[in-house]
Image (cartoon, helix red, strand yellow):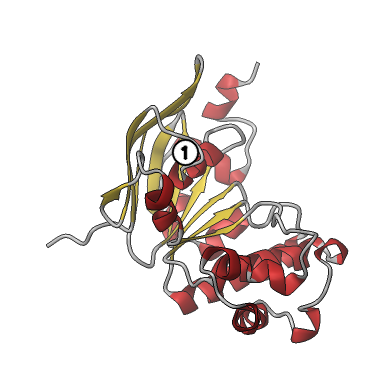
Amino acid sequence: MTDTPRLELIDVHKSFGPKVVLNGLNLALSQGESVVVIGGSGTGKSVMLKCILGLLHPDQGRIRIDGEDTVDLRGTERERILTKFGMLFQSAALFDSLTVWENVAFGLIEGAGMEREAARIIAIDKLAKVGMGEDMAEADPAGLSGGMRKRVGLARAIATEPDIIFFDEPTTGLDPIMGDIINNLITECVQDLGATTLTISHDMSSARTIADRVAMLYGGKIIWAGGVDEIDNCGNDFVDQFIHGREDGPFALEVT
């Protein structure tokens, strides 16, 4: 019997007026798999993610979590699905009105209704997993560097031990050394949880580090997908131009 994908998008379409963003997107992630979706700015990576999270409603198609259609779920049924998710936002999206540990524990306290002291213990444990000591627990997020904010965001993403974690451009705004540190932390934390992960990124260094499989989004659909070890010799001209950052290639045809 075929294993049910943990996350599956089937013929997903999304337009904004005359602008077609997703045009028959198909993608499936297996349990424990790390998939990175690459593509240039404006190709629909963020729209895809928002459709999965229920922030946008697809015009057509199915989005399934553990085999369950989720597109039309609302209220408590949507909340039930969201408890399976963790998320590291592009800008970390920390609450500056909360301390570091309160940010990490936010989903535990507000989502799961956990008592504050129990949530604080878990938060400190997750902070340790991203290389931050207990002395940082009471710190003000506004005073943290970009790399430290990403660490706190990662600790928050794993705090509820979710089944599926989404990473939105996890290395944006970081220098190459800090970017490499974050990539390695992501890999270690995800392996510890056994979570399935979907990352959207244009950073090939990040993709090569954290991906089991890479998929390229272009023209509103996945035009190539394969193992990270296959990407350099995939034979797709769009992928080849993108991963090497070349000016000349099929993308150049659309430059006006």
Q: Secondary structure at mark 1?
A: strand
Q: Nearer the viewer, residue 194 or 249?
A: 194
Q: Residue at x 76, y 53 (%)?
A: 173
Say which quadrant the N terminus sits in.
bottom left
Say which quadrant the C terminus sits in.
top right
Spot occupied by residue 181 in the image (x, y as percentages of width and height)? 68, 70
Q: Quadrant of residue 23?
A: top left
Q: Amino acid at mark 1?
A: Leu
Direction left: furthest residue: 1
Spot occupied by residue 13 in the image (x, y as percentages of width and height)? 39, 29
Q: Nearer the viewer, residue 55 or 29?
A: 55
Q: Nearer the viewer, residue 137 or 108?
A: 108
Spot occupied by residue 197 in the image (x, y as percentages of width and height)? 46, 60
Label 1 crowd bin: few (<14), some (14–19), many (20+), radius 10 Å: many
User: Could you tell whether 228 is left or right of 248 in the image?
Assistant: left
Direction right: furthest residue: 143
Q: Nearer the viewer, residue 253 or 145?
A: 145
Q: Residue at x 46, y 43 (%)?
A: 54
Above or below, 162 against 135 in this view is: above
Can residue 183 be seen? Answer: no
Q: Quadrant of residue 155?
A: bottom right
User: Could you tell whether 123 is left or right of 86 in the image?
Assistant: right
Above or below, 228 against 188 in this view is: above
**Total labels drawn:** 1
Residue that badge 1 annotates = 217
Spot occupied by residue 80 in the image (x, y as percentages of width and height)? 40, 57
Can residue 16 be seen? Answer: yes
Q: Residue at x 75, y 71 (%)?
A: 100
